[in-house]
Structure formats: C-alpha cells, structure tokens
Image (cartoon, helix red, strand yellow):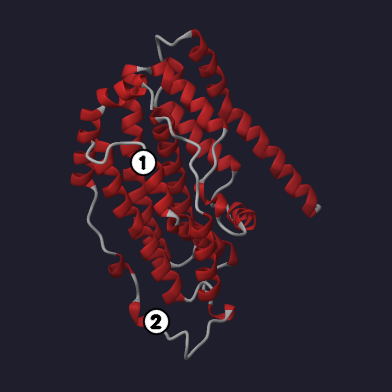
Amino acid sequence: MDSERHELIAAVEGDIERLMADHIEKRPTWYAHDLINWEDGRSFVDEPWDESQCTISPEVREALVLNLLTEDNLPYYHFSIASQFPKDSAIGRWTRRWTAEENQHAIVIRDYLMISRNCDPVALEDDRMATISKGWDSPWTDPVDIFVYTSAQELATRVSHRNTGMKADDERAYEIMKRVAADENYHYIFYKGIVTAMMQHDPSACVQSMLKVYKNFDMPGTVVPKFRRRATYAARAEIYDLRIHAEKIIAPVLREWKIDKLEGLTPEADKDREALLAMPGELVERAEKLERRAVSKLGV
C-alpha cells in the first residue's frame, strides 16, 4: 500500500469506526438453527439420498448450491482483506466481525439443503472440498479497489440470494434466503459507506478504481466446480444474469454515488467517468445479444 493510500485509509478511519458501530446496532442478531425445520430430518445412512426426494426445481437447487459453495470459500475472502490492513485497525476488527456473520450464511443454507434433501450430500461435500482446495486469489490489493469491489460484490450477493429464495417456491427457503440477503445488504451499506467517505477525500481515485473494477468484475464463485453450468441455471431462472448485473448492481451504485455530478475530477478521471456512465447501457446491449442468441437456439 503506497503512502497516498495509507493517508486515505487514515483519513477515513473514523468513518469506518462509525459505520461499524452503526452496523452492530442495526443488524438483528439471528440464529441459523431457528430457521430450520429439524423435524424433517432423516438419516442419509438409513435412507440414502435420491433426486426424487427434492422439492424445489433443478435451477433453484443449482443456484442454492452455487451460493453455498461461494460462501464456503470464506477463508480466502477474509484473508484477501485482513492481509492488507493492520490487525488492530478499524477495518481489521470489522473484517473479523464480517467473517463471523458471513459464516452464518453457509451454516443455514447447508442445514436447509441437508434437512430438505434438496441436494446430493456426497456431491456437495466433494464440491466443497474441491472449492476450498482450489482457493481464491483476489486481484484487488489497493484499498480503494478492495472497497469498490466489496461494495458491488455484496450488492450482487444480496440480489442473488434474494432472487434464489423468491424463485424457490418453498416458504422455508424463502425465509432463509431473505434473512441472508438482508445480512448482505447490511454489509453492502458498510462497504458503500467506506467508498462514500473516500470520495470526499479523493473522488478521482475512486472513479478510476470503479472503472477498473467494474470492467474486470467477477464474482468469487467462479472457482466453484461446474460454475458455468450452475451460472447458466441461475440465469435461466432469472436469479442472476448479465442484465440483472447491469440494472440491479452497476447502474444503482453509480446513481447512489452521483457519479454524473461529481466535481473536481482530474482530466483522466473525468474521461474514466464517461466510460463508467456508459457501462450499464453497454452491458444491457450485451445481455440483449445473449438473449436473442438463446431465443434463436430454441427456434422461437
């Protein structure tokens, strides 16, 4: 982290403390075990799993598994942030709190899938081992990039989790994913707040970071086995696709930060701002091409 970035982090340390205190005050305490119908559980030894036991659609099942395996890779996400900041700093303390909260998401989604028998338990464990063994290397080490990425990523995760619950046609899955999505929204608010604070000190650095991060944006779940197939299922079910990414993630954060109204940008940042503002429309155009291609393949 160069000296300018050190100074920027130091300048927003008080904002991080305030955002963390606000988060702890507002986020409800909840327990995964309260959301599970434990009485529905059966022994996988006495009654081996079979797909006929599933109660939700294959598309939603695949999305739930993709969401879960992404959450399972939490140690790498923790390291990608914690390794960049002092342990006793505000963001160091936040990262440990955030990690504890994120771990609840994997616990409750796995409990639901196991109790409801909506996944193959052997395949799920094999994929968990493969995912964590492969790991995840964050491309973002600059603090501005880290928080620009995490704010968009948390919003994307909120949208994906909420849509998965809504498409499940299962009241228990809906309630679980609504709870998890609400948590992700609290995390989004926190990271968005850090970027907002940074923009007060160096808007040009933030705008240039946004263009770089959003042009190269990938969800961390890309390391999950059979990611493309599972992402295709999620897109088919209208849980998450390129259009949703453009309209529900990128466009909203640009509006939230009033990128079009920022003043005092360097010439380079002003040029990047124009490219940034054009991005949602360009993504929608790409989405439309993909949608037309999909319709063509179906012969419609």
Tell which of 250 and 224 is nearer to you.
224
Q: Earlier in the sequence, mark 1 or mark 2?
A: 2
Q: Is residue 167 visible?
A: no
> Please, is residue 123 above or below residue 284 in the view?
below
- Whole-percent x, y for residue 34 in the image: 28, 69
Q: Residue at x 48, y 27 (%)?
A: 210
Determine the secondary structure under disc 1.
Answer: loop
- Gap between marks 1 and 2, in whole Å? 40 Å
- Whole-percent x, y for residue 143 in the image: 38, 30
> Please, is residue 134 above or below residue 275 in the view?
below
Q: Is residue 90 left or right of residue 203?
A: left
> Please, is residue 136 above or below residue 214 in the view?
below
Q: Residue at x 45, y 27 (%)?
A: 254
Q: Residue at x 20, y 29 (%)?
A: 14
Determine the secondary structure under disc 2.
Answer: loop
| Quarter that holds the N terminus | top left
Tell which of 288 and 194 is nearer to you.
194
- Whole-percent x, y for residue 286 in the image: 67, 35
Residue placed under numbered mark 2 in the picture: 41
- Whole-percent x, y for residue 103 in the image: 35, 57
How many neighbours does mark 1 have within 10 angstroms: few (below 14), some (14-19), or many (20 or more)? few
Residue placed under numbered mark 1 in the picture: 83
Q: Amino acid at mark 1?
A: Ser
> Please, is residue 79 above or below residue 127 in the view?
above
Q: Amino acid at mark 2?
A: Gly
